[in-house]
Amino acid sequence: MVETYRDTISVNDCQILAHYQFEAGQCILTLESKEIAESTCPGQFVHLSVSGILSMRRPISVMSVDKENGTFDLLYKIVGEGTRQLADRKIGDILSVIGPIGKGFEMTDNKIPLLIGGGVGMPPIIAIAQEIKGNAYYSPYVVLGSEVPFPFVTVESRLEGFSSAKFHTMPLLEEWGVPCGLASLQNFEGVYEGYVTGLAREFLDSLSKDDLKNVEIYSCGPNAMLESVSKLAYEYNLPCQVSLEEFMACAVGGCAGCVVEVQTENGPAMKRVCVDGPVFEAQSVFNDFG
């Protein structure tokens, strides 16, 4: 039987506790749900109502959770009418939320997670960082990329780690003690000038041969970025997990509107990003590097 990831899914009425808007139509939404906060794994997403006008929900990845207070955070960008109406929702409003949905990232024994997120693909990467923060077994390095201003005020890093003193970072990751470098082509202050893969490559080249054997890449972002990350992993012979971004209708595996071709042991197969993913082994999806 094909394994899908539906056991965690529930329908919840969630109250908005905070709603922040940043440049370039980026928003961070804090919702209350003890059930979702306690059951969400990095890489999973929720499917939420945006208003009383539009019946279609929108899938949004979970960025962080607060299990103690029973809340979770979502980062999204206004790109159409649905997210525009979501951006109009106020503190105290109730949203219907289905989730958490999907197969998340699986942390392995590789001690050096290289976490790469681009644009609205940053939240699952931040979620992994939260999951492993304070775990002395792991020595993560995070690369976040954006071609619009980041949805947070960047700060100078005081942490030890690859080029931490050179690049600015996300305040939340700094608070968690997770080294991070930011990348962009927009010449932002304190930000690596180039693609996330360029900064990731410099990080990999800084490692010893023994350390390189302990690296695993985890990534989420636009398909073009994920293809480049997968190629980077292929070049360095590294395991790599990617979380795909895809348009969805039902988001619970019923409509098959979000299928992608995935290479399996039995040949190519069509997999649903919502419940068969969204996380897949990178080279099962991106493998044309000829």
Image (cartoon, helix red, strand yellow):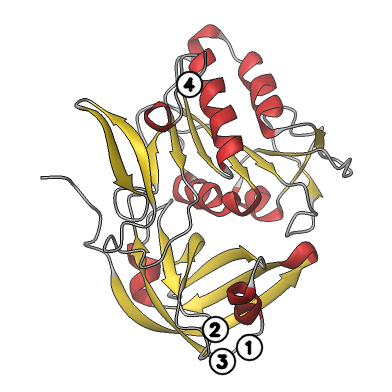
Above or below, 229 relative to 103: above
Q: Which mark is residue 55?
A: none
Question: Amino acid type of disc 1?
Answer: Lys
- Using the image as rendered, state which of residue 239 and residue 223 is in the foreground: 223
User: Would you say 261 lies left or right of 193 here?
Assistant: left
Residue 148 percent coordinates (x, y):
79, 52
Of mark 3 and mark 2, the one earlier in the sequence is 2
Q: Is residue 105 visible?
A: no
- How much space separates mark 3 and mark 2, taking CA atoms? 5 Å
Marks 4, 2: nearer the viewer: 4
Find disc 1 in the rendering and name its residue: 90
Pointer 3 local density, CA inside 10 Å: few below 14, some 14–19, many at least 20 = few
Q: Dot 3: what SS?
A: loop
Question: Amino acid type of disc 4?
Answer: Asp
Residue at left 55%, top 66%?
Answer: 74
Asked whether the beta carbons under mark 3 and mark 2 sit within 8 Å of each other, the answer is yes
Find disc 4 in the rendering and name its residue: 288
Asked whether the beta carbons under mark 2 and mark 1 sit within 8 Å of each other, the answer is yes
Q: Dot 4: what SS?
A: loop
* Quarter-of-image position of residue 224: top right
Residue at left 61%, top 36%?
Answer: 225
Q: Which mark is residue 16?
A: 2
- How much space separates mark 4 and mark 1, taking CA atoms? 45 Å
Pointer 4 local density, CA inside 10 Å: few below 14, some 14–19, many at least 20 = few
Q: Dot 1: what SS?
A: loop
Asked whether the beta carbons under mark 4 and mark 2 sit within 8 Å of each other, the answer is no
- How much space separates mark 2 and mark 1, taking CA atoms? 7 Å
Question: Amino acid type of disc 2?
Answer: Ile
Of mark 4 and mark 3, the one earlier in the sequence is 3
Find disc 3 in the rendering and name its residue: 92
- Using the image as rendered, state which of residue 98 and residue 134 is in the foreground: 98
